[in-house]
Image: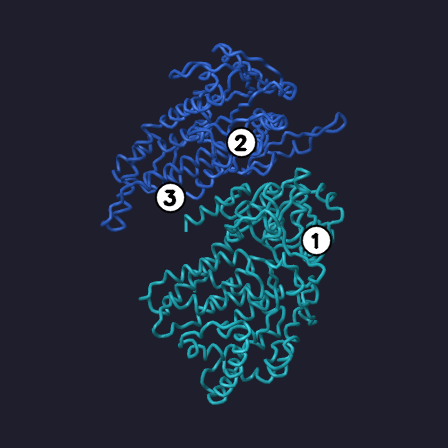
Amino acid sequence: MSTTTAAPPAEVKPKILEKPQKAPAVAQPSPNGESQTKGENAAPPPAPKLTGAELKAKAKAEKQARRAQVKAAKDATPGGAPAPASSAQSNHPTADSKGNKAKGKPDGAPSASSGATGRTAGSRGSVPTIPPKPESSIPECFSHLSMAKRLPITQADKDVHPAVLALGQHMATFAIDESITRLKATLLAFKKVIDSYTTPPGNTLARHLTPHVLNPQIEYLSACRPMCFSMGNAIRWLKLQVSKIDPDVPDAEAKKELCASIDAFIQERINFADVVITQKAADYIGEDDVVLVYGRNTLVEQVLLHAHRVAGKKFDVIVIDDPYERQGQVLAKALSAEGVEVSYSGDFGALRFHVQCADVILLGAEGMFSNGALYARCGTSDLAIAGKDFGKKVYALCETINITDRVSTDSLTYNEIDPERCSGSSFRLLYDTTPSHYLSTVVTEISSAQPTSVSYLLRKLEDSN
Amino acid sequence: MANNDAKVSISGQPPVYSNPDVGSFDIVATYHRLLADDPELTMPMATIEALIEALGASSATTVFETMNLVEAQSDRLRQSPLVANPMAVRHGSDFFKQYLIRELRQLPSSGGAASGSESRNEDQQFSVIRQHLLRNARLFATRAKDTREQIASQGRHLIADKSIILTHGASRVVRTLLERAIERVNGDPPRRFKVIYALGDGRRAESEKVVAALRAKGISVATIPETGVAHVMSKVTLVLTGAEVITAQGGIIGQLGTYQIAKLAKADGKPFYVAAEQHKLGQTFPGDQFRFGCSGFEQNLLTYFSSKTASSTAAETETDDEKRARKVRSATPLDFTPPDLITNFICDHGVKATVELEHQAIDMFLG
């Protein structure tokens, strides 16, 4: 690993660990044991396809059997595999005692484990609440919209790597929320997956890794929360890299190569992209401007801080908050701690007044469609429409990895349901789609462009890769 | 500069300079001399010619030195307070740098040679390019003038019979286009059209010269002050204007007043065409009227004062350079016309939509 790549994991790790600490810490031992036995289990050809219920039952049985086996193995070889075994042993009693809370025993109360969600902004993860059972309640015409759900770890496929298991839980609880952070965490977890992988005899890495190892991880992750566009793009890229690996290359070298290219990808498409966009967008903030932002977006926050600290500009900020998330408060506090004057509005009351006061509107993107429509936090389009009405400049900030080749003109084709606000009579959507003509400029790391040129950027990127 | 040449010829071996020496060469003066000598020269082209002259005055012989020199000299020119439009300078030097890089890529690389001698070889081949450039310094400018004729032949097809064309400014492209359109070209009959010329207050003499030239060619021209554009817009068939710079999003930066006419044309639903050479296209990306996306460029047309207060407190604190820059720039003020107000560009290679130019700008950037 090069020095440049050493930084990203360090950045993300604390994030992973900070929120629902119990779940991953307890979850670790048993899947670790799994990964030890995985080699033996993966060697025989995979079982024929079963229905969901059968599969679940089978997985459950298998899991129990495996757990017993692992336990026996651990007891039998105390000095065997030092690190994981000893940690598993030391954690063992806690695992039993806390099992009901975080992990859920196969025969225990799984509902309790699935209830350890808690998405409320302030006290996330501290008080377990039971989410509604939404599948049945969503009208059929909206059945294509998916929703994050807390999948009990016990229900996960046996091949799911512990790092991915933990990541899935974070995504399901929205502890890792933004598209770009999800992407980064996913890639880092996949690096661990690749690292702990060995090609079974009689197979080649290029042919075995994707269907037998990567796909279960991906399925698990998307079951926890529907994948965002950037993850889709990156996974397609990763699979292509895997398929390109020469079968004659030894395992260790191939893995090293893959990990290196993942690192390069993170560096180039995420870290470097963010730096470039930050600098560019900060240029669009003028002296004595009033900048209007919506909710909290990491990239937007970086831009504001850069313009203030590095470019030394004097400007005011209006934070309009998403009333369901209140993440804007975090941003407002961070900015005012830096000495930026911030006005805060908790919801869309007086939206047009605030827009009228603003000079520049900065929007963070969750994704971008190739027709130039912006896919972002629900409420963004109201802001953009008001901005257009008053002739304000509306900038959308988006890394090119977030651009999808799909097209959408409305907010219902692609969206996600808020798992916390979903009842039989109503539900809330997490995102909305802003048509391209309400945006003045899209700022990407390649170049700033008219939103309608996004598809051209995408094509250029594909050509150059 | 003669001194440098002598040094090279005596030692036989070109001396290695990390920062190429250009002697007493002054690129800013050269740039202005070129513009003054040839009124037909556009600003990006004058930049290129000035850079070639800098190359001639320098002792740079290797690829690296030359690129360094071009970089340093174009930065100097761009940041000079005497340059009215640094965006045009930037686009010209970018165009030139790209030309150099393209030429370098086309060099036949000797495959079997060791890397050291290969780069040596490359440098030798590069000196051939350099010689070629110096000998044909005027080539860029003459080619640019040819493109004006190309644009004229493209543009005449947009002029419908008995149309009335509104124009302003002293764009050479527009003038050429109108002058050719009134003539019979290759059996294509002359167009029948009339021109309304919006006279600006700021550049009265220049405008009147253009009007006189057009009338001399047999084009009937009516003049109207710029304040009367909205008044006559209902009579107009199409608006035709030039540009100093084409921006990366497919808009233009041009003489103050262009934006206003574009807005009025849009309000009345009249087509707004921009006739401009493609070498004016570049990476400048203006955010709005007050941010042209060019560091160091500031055009502050707004000075608030009343008879009871001093004119401006800033005027006392500004440096000499800033004062000079303000003087130069307020003599030739600019505005930015965003792409949504522009119907089409009339370019060297045909009539193009604004998106096409935006795509070209992206291509330029990605190389």
- The answer, for residue A305, to whether it is visible in the render is no
Instruction: Please tell me the numbered disc located at residue B252.
Output: 2
Mark 3 lies on a secondary structure that is: loop
Question: Residue type at mark 3?
Answer: Ser
Which image quadrant: the N terminus of chain A? bottom left
Q: Which chain is blue?
A: B
Residue B319, x across and y down, in percent: 59, 34
From the image, state whether disc 3 or disc 2 is nearer to you.
Answer: 2
From the image, state whether disc 3 or disc 1 is nearer to you.
Answer: 1
Q: Which residue is mark 3?
A: B18
Q: Are marks 1 and 2 in contact (CB under 8 Å)?
A: no
Dividing the picture into quarters, in which one does residue A22 lie?
bottom right
Query: Extreme bottom residue here?
Result: A76
Q: Chain of mark 3?
A: B
Residue B145, x across and y down, in percent: 41, 23
Q: Colour of chain A?
A: cyan
Q: Which residue is mark 1?
A: A321
In the displayed structure, B44 sits above or below A225; it is above
- The answer, for residue A72, to whether it is visible in the render is yes
